[in-house]
Image: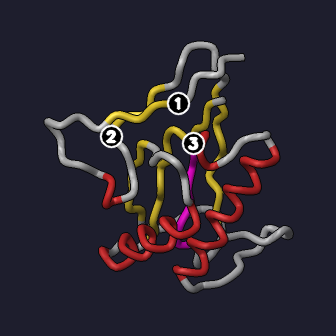
Amino acid sequence: MSQLKNSFINPEEVFNPGKYGFSHIGKIPEGKSLYYFSGQWASDLSGQLVSVNYEEQVRQTVSNIKKALASAGLSIDDVVKQTVYIADFSIEKKQILIEVASKEWRAENLPASSIVPVPLLATALNCLIEIEIISAK
């Protein structure tokens, strides 16, 4: 298997997305395997929502992502793309996501990312965030 690292590109001709917690482009070297993860959300082991508080949901969601990655022999640094679904989106929720995720995520490089506002999520009643990731190693 390839020892080359995933790389991330932020063209000078486009704004610098670092302060927003992502990169514009994630590049996977030839020979790496791709891992597609279903959306992770703020569930406990029984599949119940841990809290109706958005910030707590973000923390639990990131924790669940880290656990899912570890189960596949991966880490946050192997994530190349994330799609974040936020129910009842607001600028305040986006800011909480950036603040909490930057403390919890602690990746060497920031993945490519999209935020998708949605009216509601199908995971659980009162679920406010779901994060889907693609990783490579």
Q: Position of residue 81 (x, y in %)?
A: 49, 41
Disc 3 target residue: 79
Tags 2 and 1 touching, CB below 8 Å: no
Say which quarter of the image contains residue 89.
bottom left
Q: Amino acid at mark 1?
A: Asn
Where is residue 75 drawn, in percent x and y?
A: 68, 46
Picture disc at residue 24: 2
What secondary structure is the stretch in magenta mostly built from?
A: strand
In terms of sequence position, does the residue under pointer 3 or pointer 2 come before the other?
A: 2
Placement of 109 over or under 13, stated as above or below:
below
Decide if residue 20 is on the left or right side of residue 134.
left
Q: How is the image coloured?
A: secondary structure
Q: Residue furthest left?
A: 13
**Dot 2 amino acid type:** His
The residue drawn where x is 58% and y is 38% is 134
**Magenta region: which residues?**
128-133
| Viewer-closest of 68 and 106 | 106
